[in-house]
Amino acid sequence: MASLRDLRRRIRDVGKIKQITRAMQFVAASKLKRAQDATLNARPYAEAIDEVLADVAAVLSGEDHPLLGTPEKGKRLIVLFTSDRGLAGPFNTNTIRFVARAITEHQGDLAVVAVGRKGRDALRRARVPIEAYFDGFGDRPSFADVVPLARLVTDDYRSGGYERIDLVYSQFVSTLVQRPALEQLLPVKPSEDTKGIPGNQFIFEPSPSAVLEQLLPRYVAQRLFQAVLESKASEESSRMVAMRNATDNADDLIDDYTLEYNKVRQTSITREMIEIATGAQAR
């Protein structure tokens, strides 16, 4: 049984940890509101440009732009989005397990571009080839932050080095639900529902190649930016929930230590009273 001094020290130490986790919970909650608003506001634009490019890809081919065509051979590239920091609950673990399963199931050459230190470290331990690494884009990612990543991915695909590029990130569903997702980035996937597409009635000025030369790089950057926003909102949501659970667990632990402290103290008082009474009777 622990002594009274040990129990007091444990209660004090757990109380300090509780203060830290509570502060981290409130900070994550404030960041979550900003990240959630940015993610939800960007979704309509991302969905609209996805729909437009899918319709365009259904009526054009790789002859009009390289990003619409599929190279005859090449590796598969996965762009993995994780966080730089830990203490985010199962956020990083679930995403890394998800991409590890996708890598295991893939037959053929494969490479990864890691965004975030946690994903990079996990891939290094698994000896997965990393083509490039980017730090996380901070608490307030901007569209300009993902432009270098978009340029790298686009140039590598146009050079014929990859036959397919996928995105793996944690999709923000709600405060309590974040779901790992794998989406194809390149080549642009044509729309399966072609009934509403006007076929060759698209009019491109000055030419399809000139229009797509401006549109497709923006599409790639927007898809990457949306993945960054989704991942950031998922990270802060998972961290807030994890810190709240840690704070609740600290409260429970303090209650258990306090109860044990009172029991030990009561036992000590009872023993001292018995010793005093026994000594008085001996006189």
Image: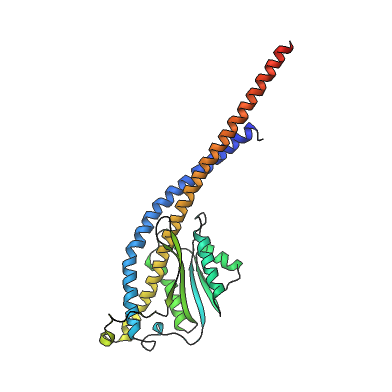
Eyeballing the image, is 217 above or below 13?
below
Quarter of the rendering containing residue 227? bottom left
Residue 131 seen in render:
no
Give the residue displayed 39% in from the left and 67% down from the top.
Answer: 226
Residue 122 seen in render:
yes
Q: Is residue 205 left or right of residue 11?
A: left
Foreground residue among 270 and 99: 270
Foreground residue among 241 and 210: 241
Q: Is residue 206 left or right of residue 5?
A: left
Eyeballing the image, is 166 above or below 84?
below
- Residue 230: % across, % down: 41, 63
- Residue 163: % across, % down: 48, 82
Eyeballing the image, is 271 above or below 61?
above
Give the residue displayed 57% in from the left and 36% down from the top.
Answer: 257
User: Residue placed farthest to the top in the image?
Assistant: 283
- Residue 173: % across, % down: 40, 61
In what quadrant of the picture does the C terminus appear? top right
Give the residue displayed 39% in from the left and 72% down from the top.
Answer: 221
Q: Is residue 265 left or right of residue 159?
A: right
Give the residue displayed 54% in from the left and 66% down from the top.
Answer: 120
Quarter of the rendering containing residue 142? bottom left
Q: How many marks?
A: 0
In what quadrant of the picture does the N terminus appear? top right
Q: How are the residues colored?
A: rainbow
- Residue 5: % across, % down: 63, 32
User: Residue placed farthest to the bottom in the image?
Assistant: 63
Foreground residue among 280 and 154: 280
